[in-house]
Image (cartoon, grey):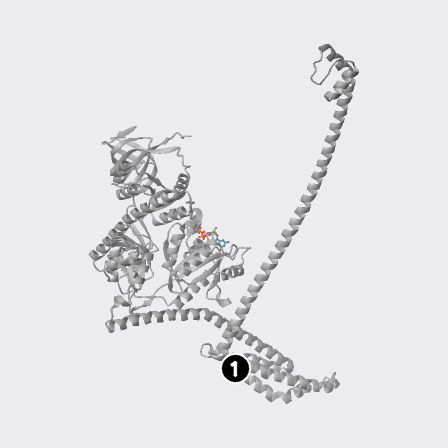
């Protein structure tokens, strides 16, 4: 109650209190409490009731609001659903309309083309398909005559209907009636028939005669004959259509090819004329300038004083000294300024050779084909079906791992296939596959349609100007829709010949081996159009498909010969490597002595590992080969050094410009080129907003001291994939504090780099090397197998250590020690400087000169 109320009650009770702040004696307080108790209780009850009512009202209101909200939600949901359905309906209608329009357009285009072609064939080109066109005309005439005869006969029949009715039932008159009906028309009839047989349809005519002789109604005979002619006409029409359809695409291609050849001839003529007129060829020709040329080099190539170029550069606002290298743009600007035509040559182009062959020396060569397509659309299965081997069934992870090649025979002709890998990370390798091929088979699964890598494959093939044959695969599957595949591909400019385009389509099932022969025949047809030729009687040249360092065999390269004949004993240069061919193995694993154009062979004898995609050529003189390779290697080294300097400077600038950006420099070494490219590809795809990843050097082969020096100079980490550092490299890395990380699984390397990039790499285990052991001889131990007689070179090896066997820098084995002995006794450990016998668990292939690295795994305490 308020103070005022209280003062009122106190006055009633005659208790002295003047103001709300007056003090009450304790005795008064208890009296007041007693007296006011009923009032206070009533008040409390009142308040309580009021509170309850308010709470109830509030609850009621809330309930109402909730119900309202729910109602609104349901209504909104309904509205949304309706809108969604409408949107869907609209989209479907639009899609259907678009599809219909597209179909109509294609059909119209097809019809128009066919019509044009038919008219053209009929009007102008009786030579190309004489039998069909003349047949068409003759049949049309025939049809006309028959129609007239039929009409005439019908008229006559109509006229004679009355009298015939009268004679109905006259049994005796039956024969006479027939002969009398036949008699008046006999001469025309015979004439018509003899003409039919004259046109090569004697069979039907004779049959008609025979039947006619037996008393067949003449009208029905004529109708039957007309029908027969209609059928022949229809067949003839179809044949004409088919012939024109098939020939259009290919004729178009042939025409294009001729045009190209003419252009080449014109160019040759131009050069010949220039020579005849004593013109300066260097002025006439485009000057080839290697990428990254220095000012002095460019001056030399263009035959102008270096000062002239420096002056121009200065005017362009880019002062450079004679020894500084120029960017592509600068080279082009300066050349333009000098009025000179130039072509900047990339390293690849620079290393390529060009040859001239007299057309009379050219002989047909087999087509080189690459199968491309989306992952799992059936590349391996197709190649497998073609070769009838069991590769796909046993293929680990379903990925074709490296480029190989094979040859198949069909109808007495050869086709060379290059196997391309299918996983997304191998894109770079695939691009190379397209460059060395004549024809691409684009495989598309009919149940899956066009997918990202299908488009990628189309782009690669188009970039390399290679014709595409489409193999629509998996047509045995229930959801297969080959027409949809055709439809989808039109969006990318791949249009079936039967729709007036340039691409052959073949429906196949690689699994059930359906349509494979048709596909191979299509390849041969396409090859005929391309008129593939090469001069086999000269020194060989071609491309490196794949190269690796093989344990025992050294550098092994798969080469594809595209000109000349490659022979055992030839001196060759491939990129930066050279050597004399020691042995050649063909695609079936046979040793061969020579390889003609379009033949893939594996060769042994190169001194180092070339890069896949490098061009190779045979030299008459081995010394010449060697000096070219050395020259190239030297140039590459200089470029690499320049590159490092360049990269570091650029890094420095970037880091200064944007302090947030950090750099991670990598040197990648691997056992095969494919691994480098796969790793590089994944690195390129990583988020590099925080840490920029630069691969400053990558190559196939063991990790060497040079790599460590490079890493030291450029503050890089060395990533080894399937390779190990040699002892000098190890020592140098320790001395310079360079990190070497080795992996045997590509994804683990990617994972680590990815984790390190975001500072999340927290090793829990660390490898601690315990000893390096050299294998000095090998011997057989009964029941154990091959054991190695070794010398421990440094550290101390223990019986429980893990180990790896390294040969020429390549990891050949990883596992456990099976035995460790000194003289005949098993021992726990052997120290540096002592000999010992070592057996490896489940591994016998130990060679003298191999190195065994022993190590143990130690736990590392986490820092957080
Ligand atoms: N039903 C059916 N299945 C097929 C056919 N061709 C291939 N397959 C299956 O499709 C899967 C993929 O085939 P692969 O030949 O490995 O495909 P790929 O394109 O070589 O795959 P990658 O090497 O991983 O790029 C396998 O399970 C095959 O059995 C076919 O014609 N019909």
Seen from the viewer's position, the closer of residues 586 and 437 is 437
> Where residue 431 sits in the image (x, y, percent)?
39, 55
Residue 391 place in picture, x, y as percent: 41, 51
Q: Is residue 377 left or right of residue 623?
A: right
Q: Quadrant of residue 750?
A: top left
In-front residue for pair 387/600: 600
Identified at 55% across, 74% down, the residue is: 234
How far across and how far down the image is residue 669, in percent?
A: 32, 45
Along the line of sight, the residue nearer the viewer: 731 or 853: 731
Q: In the picture, which quadrant includes the C terminus?
A: top left
Which residue extends farthest top?
A: 27
Residue drawn 24% across the image and 62% down it: 303
Residue 42 place in picture, x, y as percent: 78, 21
Pointer 1 residue Cβ closer than 8 Å to ligand 1 = no
Q: In the image, 111: left or right of 846?
A: right
Left or right: residue 113 versus residue 400 is right
Among all residues in the image, which is located at the extreme front?
18
Can residue 357 be spotted in the picture? yes
- Label 1 element class: helix
Q: Number of labelled discs?
A: 1
Q: Is residue 824 visible?
A: no
Judged left or right of residue 400, residue 778 is left
Q: Which residue is the site of mark 1?
A: 199
Query: Could you tell me which quadrant the N terminus lies in?
Result: top right
Badge 1 local density, few (<14 within 10 Å), some, or many (20+)? few
- Closest to the observer, 454 or 830: 454
Q: Residue at x 48, y 66 (%)?
A: 501
């Amino acid at each position: 109650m308020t103070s005022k109320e209280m003062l009122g009650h106190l006055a009633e009770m005659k208790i002295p209190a003047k103001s709300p702040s007056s003090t009450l004696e304790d005795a008064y307080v208890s009296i007041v409490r007693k007296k006011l108790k009923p009032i206070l209780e009533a008040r409390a009850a009142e308040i309580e009731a009021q509170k309850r009512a308010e709470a109830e009202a509030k609850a009621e209101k809330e309930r109402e609001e909730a119900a309202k909200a729910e109602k609104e939600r349901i209504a909104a949901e309904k509205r949304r659903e309706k809108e969604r359905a409408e949107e869907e309906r609209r989209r479907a209608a639009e899609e259907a309309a678009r599809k219909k329009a597209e179909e109509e357009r294609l059909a119209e285009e097809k019809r128009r083309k066919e019509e044009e072609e038919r008219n053209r064939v009929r009007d102008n080109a009786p030579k190309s398909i004489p039998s069909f066109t003349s047949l068409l005309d003759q049949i049309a005439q025939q049809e006309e005559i028959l129609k007239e005869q039929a009409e005439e006969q019908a008229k006559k029949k109509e006229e004679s209907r009355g009298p015939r009715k009268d004679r109905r039932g006259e049994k005796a008159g039956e024969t006479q009636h027939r002969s009398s009906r036949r008699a008046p028309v006999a001469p025309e009839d015979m004439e018509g028939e003899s003409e039919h047989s004259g046109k090569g349809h004697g069979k039907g005519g004779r049959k008609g005669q025979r039947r006619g002789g037996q008393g067949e109604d003449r009208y029905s005979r004529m109708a039957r004959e007309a029908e027969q002619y209609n059928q022949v006409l229809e067949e003839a029409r179809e044949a004409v259509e088919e012939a024109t359809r098939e020939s259009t695409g290919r004729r178009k291609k042939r025409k294009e090819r001729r045009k190209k050849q003419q252009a080449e001839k014109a160019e040759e003529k131009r050069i010949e004329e220039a020579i005849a007129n004593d013109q300066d060829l260097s002025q006439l020709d485009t000057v080839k300038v290697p990428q990254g040329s220095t000012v002095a080099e460019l001056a030399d190539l263009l035959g102008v004083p270096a000062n002239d170029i420096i002056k121009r550069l200065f005017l362009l606002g880019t002062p450079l000294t004679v020894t500084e290298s120029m960017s592509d743009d600068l080279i082009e600007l300066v050349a333009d300024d000098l009025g000179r035509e130039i072509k900047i040559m990339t390293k690849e182009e620079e290393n390529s050779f060009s040859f001239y062959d007299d057309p009379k020396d050219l002989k047909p060569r087999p087509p080189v084909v690459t199968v491309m397509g989306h992952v799992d659309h059936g590349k391996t299965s197709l190649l497998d079906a073609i070769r009838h081997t069991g590769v796909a069934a046993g293929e680990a992870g379903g990925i074709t791992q490296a480029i190989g090649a094979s040859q198949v025979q069909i109808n007495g002709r050869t086709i060379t296939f290059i196997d391309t890998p299918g996983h997304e990370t191998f894109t770079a390798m695939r691009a190379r596959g397209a460059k060395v091929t004549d024809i691409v088979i684009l495989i598309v699964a009919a149940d899956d349609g066009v997918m990202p890598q299908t488009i990628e494959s189309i782009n690669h093939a188009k970039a390399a100007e290679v014709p595409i044959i489409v193999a629509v695969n998996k047509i045995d599957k229930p959801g297969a829709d080959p027409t949809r595949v055709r439809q989808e591909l039109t969006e990318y400019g791949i249009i079936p010949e039967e729709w007036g385009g340039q691409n052959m389509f073949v429906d196949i099932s690689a699994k059930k081996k359906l349509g494979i022969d048709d596909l191979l025949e299509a390849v041969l047809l396409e090859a005929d159009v391309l008129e593939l030729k090469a001069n086999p009687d000269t020194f060989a040249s071609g491309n490196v498909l794949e190269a690796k360092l093989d344990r025992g065999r050294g550098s092994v390269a798969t080469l594809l010969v595209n000109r000349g004949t490659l022979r055992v004993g030839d001196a060759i240069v491939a990129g930066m490597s050279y050597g004399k061919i020691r042995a050649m193995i063909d695609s079936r694993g046979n040793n061969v002595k020579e390889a003609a154009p379009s033949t893939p062979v594996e060769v042994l004898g190169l001194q180092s590992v070339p890069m896949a995609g490098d061009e190779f050529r045979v030299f008459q003189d081995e010394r010449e080969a060697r000096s070219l390779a050395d020259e190239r290697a030297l140039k590459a080294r200089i470029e690499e050094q320049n590159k490092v300097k360049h990269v570091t400077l650029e890094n420095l600038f970037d880091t200064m410009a944007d302090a947030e950006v950090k750099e991670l420099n990598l040197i990648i070494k691997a056992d095969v080129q494919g691994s480098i490219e796969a790793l590089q590809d994944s690195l390129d795809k990583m988020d590099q907003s925080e840490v920029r990843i630069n691969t400053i050097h990558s190559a196939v082969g063991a990790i060497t001291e040079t790599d460590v020096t490079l890493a030291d100079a450029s503050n890089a980490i060395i990533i080894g994939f399937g390779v190990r550092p040699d002892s000098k490299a190890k020592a140098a890395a320790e001395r310079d504090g360079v990190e070497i990380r080795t992996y045997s699984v590509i994804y683990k390397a990617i994972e680590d780099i990815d984790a390190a990039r975001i500072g999340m790499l927290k090793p829990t285990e660390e490898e601690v090397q315990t000893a390096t052991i050299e294998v000095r001889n090998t011997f057989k131990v009964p029941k154990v197998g091959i054991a190695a007689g070794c010398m421990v070179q440094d550290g101390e090896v223990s019986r429980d250590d893990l180990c790896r066997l390294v040969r020429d820098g390549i990891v050949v084995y990883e596992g456990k020690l099976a035995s460790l002995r000194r003289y005949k006794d098993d021992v726990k450990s052997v120290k540096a400087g002592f000999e010992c016998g070592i057996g490896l668990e489940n591994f016998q292939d130990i060679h003298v000169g191999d190195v065994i690295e022993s190590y143990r795994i130690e736990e590392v305490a986490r820092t957080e």
